[in-house]
Image: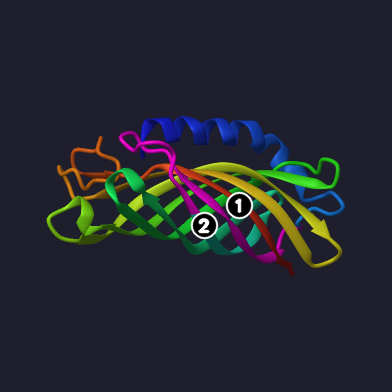
Amino acid sequence: MPTRLRVLLAALVLSLAPAAARAGDEAGALDAGATYVTGRVGAFLLTARGVSGTPAGPDAEVTAGRVVLPGVALEVAGGGWRVRVAASDTTVTVLPVTLSVKLFAPMEHGFQPYAVAGGGAYWTRLAVDATQASSAAQDERWSGGFHAGLGALHRLGERLVVGVDFRYVLLEARGTFAGTALSAGGAAPNGARLDGVRLTASAGMAF
């Protein structure tokens, strides 16, 4: 796991772990044993080195989670995003399947803050238009990636849950257009760096 992600994960755990044990005892909080399903929609911002500007595109995901201990939940999720890098006429499509751990903090003004971290398998396709190459080209790969972030949930009634979520993704599509100008994040010697930020809003049901 990259060093900077380990540091971020450690900081998140140390900041929220003491409060997580108390989080499930408050009115409006997700209780231990609760199951929830949410949909998240928003934007992905490609921030990898070597990419001109900060290309952005739509991001969507479906998440299923269960609170396994007071203040601690496990989640599985599947979704994806697509970004077009205009400078190289490259369209980046990413479809991740991930597992995450969430640490909930005590309720604040009706909102339940949390830290989230995890990893998973990322299917990545880079497609280059013929205007930037001798012919149109594309490559597809499965790669491992990691994420960490912060967010907050708010319950509307007994079942409905809404929230906001910020996550930073560390992803290298290894082997994808390696060593060529077609790499969307040209700083990676063995592939395309596709690090970025996911900004989403969510809505779903808790049971």
The residue shown at (72%, 38%) is 19
120 w.r.t. 6: above or below: below
Q: Which residue is mark 2?
A: 59
Residue 7 rendering spot, x and y as whole percentages: 47, 30
Is residue 49 inside the magenta stretch? yes
User: Looking at the rendering, in which quadrant would you find the N terminus?
Assistant: top left
The residue shown at (82%, 50%) is 25
Looking at the picture, the colour scheme in use is rainbow
- Span of residues in magenta: 31-57
Residue nearest the observer in this picture, 184 or 129 = 129
130 w.r.t. 17: above or below: below
Q: Which residue is mark 1?
A: 200
Task: Looking at the image, tell me whether mark 1 or mark 2 is earlier in sequence order.
Answer: 2
Residue 73 rendering spot, x and y as whole percentages: 63, 54
Query: Image check: 104 left or right of 41?
Result: right
Residue 153 rendering spot, x and y as whole percentages: 73, 51
User: Looking at the rendering, in which quadrant would you find the C terminus?
Assistant: bottom right
Near mark 2 (Cα within 10 A), the count class, few <14, some 14-19 or many ≥20, is many
Is residue 46 inside the magenta stretch? yes
Residue 40 rendering spot, x and y as whole percentages: 61, 59
Q: Amino acid at mark 2?
A: Asp
